[in-house]
Amino acid sequence: MKREIRVSEILLLMGYSFILLFMLSHDWIPLGSFNDIEAIREVKTVKELVTVTIINAGQIILLMGIIIAFIGKKYPIWIKLWLIIHPSCIFAGALIAWWIPYFFGYGAEARAESYEQMFGNTHTFLPVLNGIAPNTIHFLFHLTLLLCIILTIYISLTSRKKEE
């Protein structure tokens, strides 16, 4: 069967490639004002960072592997569900860790001090609310993840062009 790769599938892989790059670099490689690896190491041990990096990057590699295996083909229903539910759970974690405390204050007190210590010297364009201001690199990660979820829903709901 010949693969008919759609632009939406290429964009989805590009989005996950950015997320993988984020997962592998943001706690390890100095990125100027976008991260503060010294401050992160004051809060998190190297062992914790290695564990989190492996788990997070592993999830994205798994998603990318599934996409690559089925790109340009008809996605089975279980793959469609996996590619929507799995990243949605990751996004729910981002909402709980960043955006709910930021906008509504729930859990902000518990996070504000460590977030300020780890991310207080990083670039943000958002004002501080409830003691938290999501930094730019996390904002870009969360936005890209949301766009990947939307693209996956689009890919799942639209049919391929029929072969002539």
Image (spheres, rainbow, N blue to C red):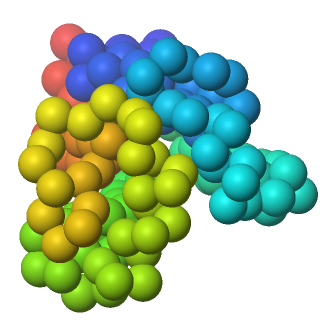
- For residue 115, side relative to residue 163 (left or right): right
Q: Quadrant of residue 116?
A: bottom left
Closer-to-camera residue (147/23): 23
Residue 18 shows in the view: yes
Quadrant in the rendering for residue 90: bottom left
Total number of numbered discs in the rendering: 0
Identity of the residue drawn at 22% across and 30% down: 160
Answer above or below: position of 88 versus 141: below
Q: Position of residue 132 (x, y in %)?
A: 26, 62
The residue under the point 65% across, 36% down is 37
Could you say where residue 3 lies in the image, as x and y percent from the top left? 45, 17
> Which residue is drawn at the image coordinates 25% and 15% (left, top)?
7
Give above or below for 8 relative to 109: above
Name the quadrant containing residue 141.
top left
Judged left or right of residue 7, residue 121 is: right
Looking at the image, can residue 155 be seen?
A: no
| Closest to the observer, 111 or 144 | 111
Picture coordinates of residue 70 (x, y %)? Answer: 51, 35
Assign the C terminus to one quadrant of the image: top left
Q: Is residue 1 left or right of residue 98?
A: right
In the displayed orientation, state which residue is furthest to the right.
Answer: 47
Q: Position of residue 128 (x, y in %)?
A: 16, 56
Q: Is residue 59 above or below residue 147?
A: below
